[in-house]
Image (spheres, helix red, strand yellow):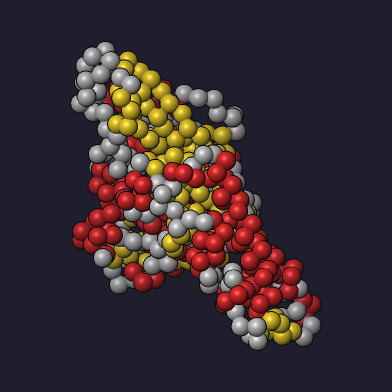
Amino acid sequence: MKRSDYIVGLDVGTTKICALIAVPGEGGTMDILGVGTHPSRGLRRGVVVNMEQTVESIASATDEAERMANVKVHDVYVGIAGSHIRSFNSHGIVAVKGRQVASDDVSRVLEAARAVNVPQDHEVIHVLPQEYVVDHQNGIRDPHGISAIRLEGKVHIVTGAVTAAQNLVRSVEQAGLEVKDFVLEQLASSLSCLTDDERELGVALVDIGGGTTDIAVFHDAAIRYTSVIPLGGDHVTRDIAIGLRTPTHEAERIKRRSGCVSPAQVDREETLEVPSVGGREPRILSRRILCEIIELRMEEILRVVRQEIQKNGYEDLIASGLVLTGGTTLMAGMTEFAEEILGLPIRLGIPMGMGGGLVQHVRSPVHSTAVGLLLYGQSERLRGRQWRLNGEGNRFPSILSRRWWKPFKRRWFDQAFRYRGGTFLLDIAQRGRQHAL
């Protein structure tokens, strides 16, 4: 196969780096050819704090995927997240003067919506259309071809710290790769985990990773709210290490092997062996002690999630409830515990739309973001359009238009949402799910 046939997703997380290599399959699915994972060293809450270690982790994960797929990777779609991410809603208005709305009018209204003050150390990552208003008629998803006097666009804008994104790009570059595009991680996860019905009725995707918990709220098939909470699975691990007086790496192992968020589900007589610090003899403790430690921290995380959704006024809009994904959600009893704390329907988000012999290796909440990056890349290819900043087809300047990042291309997420009223990417994901079922 040619280099252009492959799509590569790179999930750069706080606890792991995951690289997936795939090619478009039948029925809109992606056939997985290579999977590579490596412990993430050098990142904290999604931000690079040690360049050398980050480069090594990225290179190791990519090399593993390359060997499995027997191909050489050149460019990748990279997930971006972290406590530096900010988001808000905006709108813009332009005059159409009685003619039919054309693509240029849509571009102008999106540019007007993007013309807001952003802190000097932040730059726009995504401009995501929510809906259009034509002559006071709201709820229009695709205004093309409609006669109008005035066109208004409502959008969701996501920004990130310039230095955080720059360090991530340099890390990927030093690992011998090129950043083809940045995608906000909870948006990528939503492509692989959510259904069209959930987006239409209203749903909150909650991706509980190692360093952060990422939230994305959808309603009427559009993104309404995103947020990043600086709490995640690493905090659970540290609580276990302190509570059980065991090394951090042993706490992580114990959490994955014996973790449960509901002590009531654990037999009182069940025990586990806990290594001690400083070479002391291991101790035998009740498993319930471990579960009580996990329960307290997970309850805190879920309550903060509920507060974030409530204080921004979206609690009544998520009729479909919550979809939980991310590696931390694999602990036993997670779904039932979340339903009890949040009082909403909960399901576990498992990535869909994949095929090939390695599909079982990625059918886990751990790979939701990486699979979503592949689906995003597939949608870009099917559109057959490349939007470059500071060139023909330029829409919005951003961090990737800076001179020292000239080699890196930028394709805007908002353009992908314009097809069929903003549901092109969702159609691709849905086609893959139907084929998989």
Residue name at image x 59 percent, y 71 percent: 262
Q: Is residue 244 left or right of residue 169?
A: right
Q: In this view, does 194 lie to the left or right of 81?
A: left
Q: In this view, does 392 lie to the left or right of 215?
A: left
Q: Where is residue 425 in the image (x, y as percent from the top left)?
A: 31, 47
User: Is residue 98 at all visible to an observer of this figure?
Assistant: yes
Q: In this view, does 155 lie above or below 100?
A: below
Q: Where is residue 79 in the image (x, y as percent from the top left)?
A: 46, 50
| Quadrant assignment, res 86 | top right
Q: Is residue 169 above or below residue 345?
A: above
Residue name at image x 26 percent, y 65 percent: 437
Q: Where is residue 137 in the image (x, y as percent from the top left)?
A: 30, 24
| Quadrant assignment, res 144 | top left
User: Is residue 46 at all visible to an observer of this figure?
Assistant: no
Residue name at image x 57 percent, y 76 percent: 265
Q: Where is residue 189 in the image (x, y as percent from the top left)?
A: 42, 54
Front position in the image: 408 or 309: 309
Q: In this view, does 345 lie above or below 121?
A: below
Q: Is residue 246 left or right of residue 267?
A: right
